[in-house]
Image: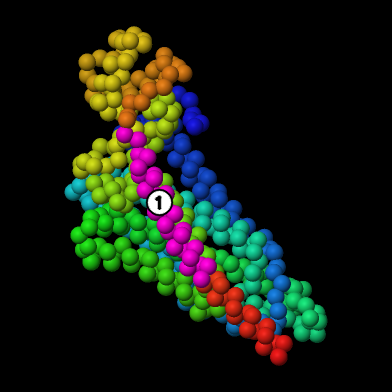
C-alpha cells in the first residue's frame, strides 16, 4: 500500500493540539467533496443528454407534465429532507449522549457525520448525473414537454428530439433524464446514512427487539420510500428509475458510512465514529494507516492502530535500546508522550532512525469488521438486483402490448 512519508507537526487550535497532516488531510477531503458536488450540479443542469429515440404513439410517454412547484416534493423540500434531517439527527444523537460521550467525542461524531453526508451526496450525484445524461431515456411526460410536430413524423420509424416544437430547450432536455431518479438517489443516500447512524447510536441490534428503537431507525427509510414514490405519481419517473436511484443512493450511503463509522453490529462502540486518521506512521502498524486516540468517557470505542497510548510507548521502550539510543529523548513520564506534540516528535525521530523497517505495535487489525461490511453489501446488492430485475422485466412488457395494439 502507498502511504505518505511526510514528517508530521502539531498545530495549536483553540487550546487544543492537533496533527498538521491530519488537519490538512480533512481539509482536502472537504475540498474534493465540495468540488465534485458543485461540478456535477453545474454539469447536470447545463450539459445536454444523449437523446434517446422514442415513439409518439407510446402511451407510456403520454402522461401530463406538472411544473416542479406543483409536484409533491419539489427541489427545496427535497434538500431539506435529504440533507436537513441527517444533520439534525447527527447533532441530536451526539448531544443526548452527553453522560457517556465527552465534549471532544460529541464534536468529532457530528463533524464526521457531516463529512460522511457531504461525501455521500457528492458521489451519488456524480453517479446519477452521469447515468442520466448517458442513458438519455425519456420521462413519462416527454410528449407533453416535447409537443411533437406531427407533420414531420418519420414513417415506420422512431422519432428523435428534432420532432419537438417546444421552444423551451431546458424543458425538453429534462424530459430525457428519466433514468435514474435523482430524487430517489438523493433521499435514499441521506436517509440510509441517518438510519445507520440511529441504529448504531441506539444499539438497535442488541437482540432485545425494543420497538421504539426499531421504528426510529426505520423511519428515515419510510421517508425515502415516500419521496421516491411521489416521482411516479408526479409523472416524472417510471418504477425502474426509482428503483435504480434507490439502489445508487443506498449503495453510496452504506459505502460512506462504512468509511467513517464502525459496524452498527459493534454494540460496545455505540455508533461512535472512527477516531481521527493519522498519516505517516504506517511503518509502525505493519504498513496500515493509523488513528489518533480520542479520550472517551465510555469504554468500547474503536481504539485500534493508535500510537498515542501508554501501551504503545512501552513497546517503543522495549525495542529502542536494541536498535537506537534514545535514552536522552524518553524520560520516565510515559504519559507525556501520549500527548500529541511529544508523540509526533517521538515518531518523527523513530521514522528517521528506523528507516525502511516495519513494526506492528497493534496486533488487532479490524479485518473482521471489513469482512462483515462486505458481506452486508453483497447481500444488499443481491436483494436489490433481484427486485430491480423483476420490476424491469415487468416494465418491458408494457411497450410490447402498446406496439401490438398499434399493429392492429
Q: Secondary structure at mark 1?
A: helix
Asked whether 366 falls inside the magenta stretch, the response is yes
Above-or-below relation of 67 to 52 = below
Q: Which residue is mark 1?
A: 375
Above-or-below relation of 102 to 90 = above
Question: What range is drawn magenta here?
Answer: 364-390
Res. 217 visible in picture: yes
Res. 202 visible in picture: no
Magenta span main SS: helix
Asked whether 322 falls inside the magenta stretch, the response is no
Who's the residue at 47% across and 50% down the image? 119
| Residue 185 percent location from the top left of the image | 49, 63
Q: How many marks?
A: 1
| Residue 338 percent location from the top left of the image | 28, 26
Quadrant into which the C terminus falls: bottom right
Q: Nearer the viewer, residue 287 or 5?
A: 287
Amino acid at each position: 500500500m502507498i502511504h505518505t512519508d511526510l514528517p508530521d507537526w502539531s498545530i495549536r487550535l483553540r487550546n487544543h493540539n492537533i496533527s498538521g497532516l491530519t488537519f490538512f488531510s480533512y481539509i482536502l477531503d472537504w475540498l474534493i467533496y465540495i468540488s465534485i458536488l458543485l461540478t456535477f450540479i453545474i454539469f447536470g443542469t447545463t450539459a445536454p443528454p444523449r437523446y434517446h429515440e422514442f415513439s409518439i404513439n407510446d402511451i407510456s410517454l403520454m402522461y401530463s407534465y406538472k411544473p416542479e412547484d406543483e409536484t409533491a416534493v419539489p427541489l427545496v423540500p427535497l434538500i431539506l429532507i435529504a440533507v436537513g434531517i441527517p444533520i439534525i439527527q447527527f447533532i441530536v444523537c451526539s448531544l443526548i449522549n452527553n453522560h457517556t460521550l465527552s465534549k471532544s467525542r460529541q464534536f468529532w461524531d457530528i463533524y464526521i457525520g457531516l463529512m460522511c453526508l457531504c461525501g455521500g451526496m457528492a458521489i451519488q450525484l456524480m453517479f446519477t448525473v452521469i447515468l442520466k445524461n448517458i442513458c438519455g431515456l425519456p420521462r413519462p411526460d416527454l410528449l407533453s414537454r416535447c409537443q411533437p410536430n406531427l407533420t414531420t413524423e418519420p414513417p415506420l420509424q422512431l422519432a428523435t428530439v428534432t420532432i419537438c416544437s417546444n421552444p423551451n430547450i431546458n424543458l425538453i432536455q429534462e424530459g430525457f433524464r428519466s433514468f435514474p431518479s435523482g430524487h430517489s438517489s438523493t433521499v435514499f443516500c441521506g436517509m440510509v446514512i441517518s438510519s445507520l447512524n440511529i441504529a448504531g447510536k441506539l444499539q438497535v441490534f442488541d437482540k432485545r427487539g425494543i420497538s421504539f428503537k426499531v421504528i426510529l431507525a426505520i423511519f428515515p427509510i419510510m421517508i425515502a420510500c415516500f419521496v421516491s414514490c411521489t416521482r411516479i405519481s408526479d409523472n416524472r419517473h417510471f418504477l425502474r428509475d426509482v428503483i435504480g436511484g434507490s439502489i445508487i443512493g443506498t449503495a453510496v450511503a452504506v459505502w460512506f458510512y462504512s468509511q467513517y463509522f464502525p459496524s452498527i453490529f459493534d454494540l460496545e462502540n455505540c455508533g461512535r465514529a472512527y477516531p481521527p486518521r493519522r498519516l505517516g506512521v504506517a511503518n509502525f502498524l505493519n504498513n496500515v494507516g493509523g488513528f489518533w486516540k480520542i479520550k472517551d468517557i465510555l469504554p468500547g470505542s474503536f481504539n485500534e492502530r493508535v500510537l498515542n497510548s501508554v501501551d504503545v510507548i512501552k513497546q517503543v521502550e522495549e525495542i529502542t535500546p536494541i536498535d537506537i539510543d534514545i535514552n536522552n529523548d524518553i524520560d520516565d513520564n510515559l504519559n507525556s508522550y501520549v500527548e500529541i506534540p511529544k508523540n509526533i516528535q517521538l515518531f518523527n525521530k523513530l521514522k528517521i532512525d528506523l528507516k525502511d523497517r516495519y513494526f506492528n505495535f497493534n496486533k488487532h487489525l479490524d479485518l473482521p469488521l471489513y469482512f462483515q461490511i462486505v458481506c452486508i453489501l453483497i447481500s444488499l446488492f443481491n436483494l436489490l438486483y433481484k427486485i430491480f430485475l423483476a420490476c424491469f422485466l415487468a416494465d418491458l412488457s408494457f411497450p410490447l402490448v402498446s406496439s401490438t395494439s398499434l399493429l392492429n
